[in-house]
Amino acid sequence: MKTARNGKSRQRAGACGGFTLIELLVVIAIIAILAGMLLPALTRAKTKGQGILCLSNFRQLTLAWHMYNGDNRDTTPWSWTDVGSQRMWVTGDLDFAPANRSNWDVEKDIKTSLLWPYCGNSTGIWKCPADLSAVTVNGVLRPRVRSMSMNNWFGYAWPTGGNELFRVLYKVSDMTDPGPAGIFVMLDEREDGINDACFCVDMAGYPGQPNRASIIDYPASYHNSAGGFSFADGHAEIKRWRDSRTMPKLKKGQPLPLNVPSANNADVIWMQARATVRK
């Protein structure tokens, strides 16, 4: 009896000493399912946080724009010009060449820009936190310094296709119907399409011929298929894109073809309605 009891006790102790292979597999499967449920939520939360910071950057940089206007009798800086850069809001073309300091050195263009004296010594407000583009310089990965571009209609008109019917904006007072709340100043541009700091909105076909719409430059879609904008009254918003042609697949290290037809693209029409006003 004593031996039997001891054997039985040893059997029970062994039975309670660990998990079977099936039990371990079930636990692993449950953890995998939970991770699969949680990771998308965490990703969305991260993207939402980046969107909030992006909006803050837009508001600060647009405030700098307003302060510049106030110090210059309501005259706004130009998005681009081919007659000298003194009036451009910021100079420098971006690409992925290590020798191009405009890509990675804030001293080159950002700190010499017209808006820099009003930026509170903050270089971070010039770039969306979701833009991870970088350039390898002497073996070191250096983040690019800018994702923001300015609406071309501030100081510059796209030269073809009926654009002469629309007003080039030189002063805040030029913005009528819609007013400042309806005209965008800056937006985030895609890392594979950004070059100069001028974002061109072709007004061809607006408002009655949407079949003539085209995309000159591509807006970013870093925030769950949406991109950031700031407006002349100082507010900022995230715009969700509706047409897949506005969001071509990103191919790292390959430049995006620009200036392409995009007939009846609701996203282009949305930007046209907020780019300028008719003369």
Image (spheres, grey):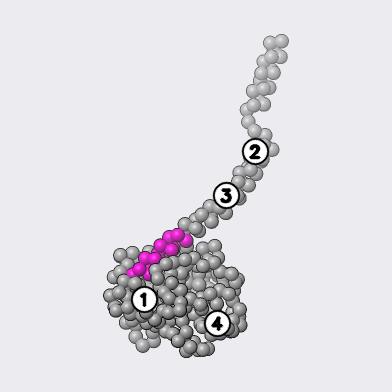
Residue at mark 2 to residue at mark 1: CA–CA distance: 60 Å
9 vs 257: above or below:
above
Residue 119 horizontal side relative to residue 21, left or right = left
Which of disc 3 and disc 2 is earlier in sequence?
2
Quadrant in which the N terminus appears:
top right
| Furthest-top residue in this view | 1
Which of disc 4 and disc 3 is earlier in sequence?
3
Residue at mark 2 to residue at mark 4: CA–CA distance: 63 Å
For label 1, the residue is 90
What amino acid is found at the position of numbered circle 2 in the picture? Leu
Q: Based on the picture, tell me whether residue 54 belongs to the magenta stretch.
A: yes
Q: Which label was assigned to residue 160?
A: none
Which of disc 4 and disc 1 is earlier in sequence?
1
Magenta span: 51-64
Which of disc 3 and disc 1 is earlier in sequence?
3
Considering depth in this image, is 22 or 185 the residue closer to the camera?
Answer: 185
Residue 145 at x, y = what percent? 40, 68
Q: Which label was assigned to residue 38?
A: 3
Q: Is residue 149 visible?
A: no
For label 4, the residue is 207
The secondary structure type at the circle numbered 3 is helix
What amino acid is found at the position of numbered circle 4 in the picture? Pro
What amino acid is found at the position of numbered circle 1 in the picture? Val
The secondary structure type at the circle numbered 2 is helix
**Neighbourhood count class around disc 2 (C-alpha, 10 Å): few under 14, some 14–19, many 20 upward:** few
Residue 124 horizontal side relative to residue 238, left or right = left
Q: Nearer the viewer, mark 2 or mark 1?
A: 1
For label 2, the residue is 24
